[in-house]
């Protein structure tokens, strides 16, 4: 259910996106992000030469429970905006245990109806400490393309 909500959010917000996006494949530093989305920068709805470089990349990591959160898999955030998606119960538990999420801009939890994701503040996040992308746009886009290609081949 959480994954479907992320997919709906990315599609509704007009992002190009892929699930299970790998970085540094074949190296000891290989990391996989559950969802990576990209929206080109288009002021006044005009595509310009810098639209790709100035675009926004968003990363979503989906965690269904505390065991999933502490498993050591995931929690990789390379985007301009980074989100942890989890049930409200897990959010409350993270908050109670004061688990800091430095790279996360917000935690998204399903609404009561289960039809949308509601942002909640991330513990340890402040506007002065905004995340910033460390990877170039061409690499991020290539990995989105690769992930979609691999999904089509499966």
Image (tube, helix red, strand yellow):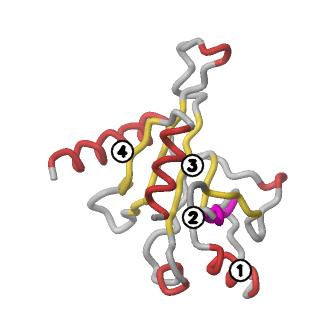
Q: Nearer the viewer, mark 1 or mark 4?
A: 1
Q: Is residue 115 above or below residue 85?
A: above
Within-10-Å neighbours for mark 1: few <14, some 14–19, many 20+: few
* Local SS, label 3: loop
| Whole-percent x, y for residue 31 in the image | 40, 63
89 within the magenta span: no
Judging depth in this view, the residue of 86 and 104 nearest the camera is 86
Residue 79: numbered disc: 3
Marks 3 & 1, CB-CB < 8 Å contact:
no
Query: Considering the image in quadrants, where does the N terminus appear?
Result: bottom left
Mark 3 or mark 4: whose residue is earlier in sequence:
3
Q: Is residue 64 above or below residue 4?
A: below
User: In this image, 39 relative to 97: left or right?
Assistant: left
Q: Which residue is mark 1?
A: 92
Q: Which residue is mark 2?
A: 85
The residues tagged by marks 3 and 1 sit, at their Cα atoms, a distance apart of: 25 Å
Quadrant for residue 53, please give it: top right
Q: What residue is rendered at 43% in x and 42% in y?
A: 17
Marks 2 & 1, CB-CB < 8 Å contact:
no
Prevailing secondary structure class for the magenta stretch in the rendered image: strand
User: In this image, 28 relative to 15: left or right?
Assistant: left
User: In this image, 22 relative to 123: left or right?
Assistant: left
Mark 4 or mark 2: whose residue is earlier in sequence:
2
Q: How many marks?
A: 4
| Whole-percent x, y for residue 149 in the image | 23, 42
User: In this image, 152 relative to 58: left or right?
Assistant: left
């Amino acid at each position: 259910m959480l994954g479907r909500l992320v997919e709906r959010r990315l599609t509704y917000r007009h992002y190009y996106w892929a699930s299970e996006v790998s970085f540094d494949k074949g190296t000891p530093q290989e990391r996989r992000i559950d969802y990576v989305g990209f929206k080109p920068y288009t002021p006044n709805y005009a595509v310009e030469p810098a639209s790709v470089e100035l675009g926004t990349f968003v990363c979503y990591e989906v965690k269904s429970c505390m065991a999933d959160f502490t498993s050591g898999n995931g929690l990789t955030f390379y985007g301009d905006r980074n989100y942890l998606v989890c049930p409200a119960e897990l959010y409350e538990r993270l908050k109670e245990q004061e688990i800091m999420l430095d790279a996360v801009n917000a935690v998204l939890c399903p609404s009561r109806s289960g039809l949308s994701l509601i942002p909640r503040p991330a513990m340890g996040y402040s506007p002065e400490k905004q995340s910033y992308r460390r990877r170039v746009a061409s690499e991020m886009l290539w990995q989105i393309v690769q992930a979609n290609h691999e999904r089509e081949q499966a």
